[in-house]
Every structure is written in C-alpha cells, then in structure tokens.
Amino acid sequence: MAAPHARGRRRARPRPAGSSESRAVPRRATPMTLRLYDVGHDLRDGDGIVHALNDVTLTVRRGELVALLGPSGAGKSTILWLASGIEAPTRGTVSWDGRDLAALSRRERELFRRETLGMLFQDPPLQRGVDAVGNVESRLVGNGARPSHARRAAKQVLVELGLGARLHHPPQKLSGGERRRVALSRALVNSPDLLLADEPTANLDTEHGALVLDRLRQEAHEHRRAVLMVTHDPAAAAIADRCLTLTDGRLQTTAVAAARPERGAR
Ligand SMILES: Nc1ncnc2c1ncn2[C@@H]1O[C@H](COP(=O)(O)OP(=O)(O)OP(=O)(O)O)[C@@H](O)[C@H]1O
C-alpha cells in the first residue's frame, strides 16, 4: 500500500493486533474469503462515542464483486478500513482466508497488506512530484520486485485504465478522475486477491467510469479476486453480483443477483 494511511479518528476501545481479545473465527474457514462476523465499531468523537457499525456480518468470496451502498455516514468506509486490517473492530471478527486479521503478528499483517490487499482509499495518498508510473511502480519495488519489472507492470496497468498519455504527469498535474485511476492502478498492480475500493468511479466521466467498472468486474470474475466496493453510483451497483445496504451502521441485504456459477479455480 501507499504510505501508512491512518484515518483522522480514534477507536473508542483500542484493540491492538494479537491482543487477547481477538477471537478465533467462529465458522469453518473458507479460502480466499473476506468475512466480517458480528462486527461492531465505535469511534471517539470529542467527548462522545459514535457507534459507526453494529452487528455487521458479511462475506465476500473469491470471484465475487460486492457493492456496499447507503447514505452518507452509514459506515461504508468504516467497513473497508476494518476489512483492510488497518483498524481492528471494537467487537466481532474480521477475517481473510479464515484468519482473524486482529490476531496476525506485525509481520503477517505487513505481508497481508503488501501481497494480498489492494485498497483504493476515498482520498488516495499519492506522492506529489512523482509521476504516475513512479507512484504505481513504487508499490512493487517496495515489495521487492525488480525495478524493470515494476516499471513495465506499472505502465501496463496505467495504460489499461486509459492513462497512456499521462504516464509521466505528477499527481498535481492530473485531474481528480485521473488521480483516482492512478490510485486504482497502484491498488491493482500487485494483483491483490482482496480488492477494496472506496467510490471507484468518483470524479469519472461515463466512459472512464465504465472502463473502471469493467476492470473491477474482470478482477472478480476472470482473475477470481474478492472485490468489495463502496459506491453511490447506480452504474457500479448494476454490475455487482450482490448489493448490500448499510443504514445507521447496520446492514440489510437489498438485492441478490442470480447465483454466479463457480468458475474454474485459479
Ligand atoms: N474522524 C471521525 N471521528 C469520529 N467519527 C467519525 C469520523 N469520521 C467519520 N465518523 C463517523 O463514523 C460514522 C461512519 O462514517 P463512514 O465514513 O464510515 O461513513 P460512510 O458511509 O462511508 O459515509 P460517506 O458516504 O459520506 O463516505 C459516521 O457517523 C461518521 O460521522
């Protein structure tokens, strides 16, 4: 991931990684599956506490594209932060591949973020003064890839997301939609098994929005990744296998697409 990216908020009850509060996953572990089980999350807001999430249980399996909908402040981004392992839930369990993220060692958590996770933040952190290729390739170089390989891979994903003419522009010379696609390229460049995207089509015109959505669908259905996106965009909701709606930190299932036939395992 990019530079450590902490939210400007504090958990009401900090629960450090590996703490005795972290629990075993209360269910048979399913490979390459993101699972939030009975999750609640509180945030400190001045002297008060915001119950951002309550009793949230959800699963995103490999090969599945799930959209998270709901009004502003419902807790959608909070779910992504917890799913990324950057924050641990106040209550309940967040697991990937059957492992409680809060129980991972520091080293395991680092590996999870570097090798398994791709995350597009609501406000993506890109390095100023570093061109688009540099911003994307640095993710791979940071993971130990050869610079020549990292450069090639970075260019390829940027071109695929329609940024072939912007490879050498730094973020401050890119539009909001272009920066978003650079950040998505950075999230995708290491072929993550778990992709979390906060408003992937924000600031994009119809053409580029469709390009991005097509890519997310491809990541889920062809590359067999687990993809969870937060969106307000009806076009994004329309391509999801399932749409989940959050209201006041609680989840309701609004629509379930026809069951997708299991495709060949990778
Ligand atoms: N820095 C913060 N400190 C305390 N509470 C916060 C903070 N940021 C957000 N919250 C609260 O946490 C709850 C969930 O916020 P979250 O950002 O997850 O909502 P969201 O559904 O993603 O909203 P949006 O669609 O506007 O991005 C809201 O009640 C919000 O006010």
Image (tube, grey):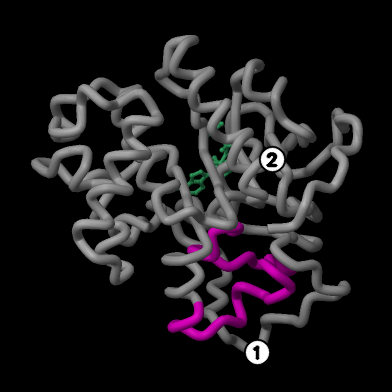
Q: Which mark is residue 136?
A: none
- Label 2's element? helix
Q: Which residues are magenta?
A: 82-108
Q: Within the image, what quadrant is residue 128 found in?
A: top left
Residue displayed at 48% across by 63% down: 86
Q: Tell whether 123 sits left or right of 261.
A: left
Residue holding disc 2: 221
Confirm whether the magenta stretch covers residue 83. Answer: yes
Q: Quadrant of ligand 1?
A: top right
Residue 12 belongs to the span the image colors magenta: no
Q: Is residue 4 above or below residue 121?
A: below
Which residue has dot 1 on it? 20
Task: Answer yes or no: is residue 256 visible.
Answer: yes
**Which residue is depicted at the point 80% across and 61% down?**
38
Three-letter residue code for mark 2: His
Which residue occupies the foreground of this view, 219 or 251? Answer: 219
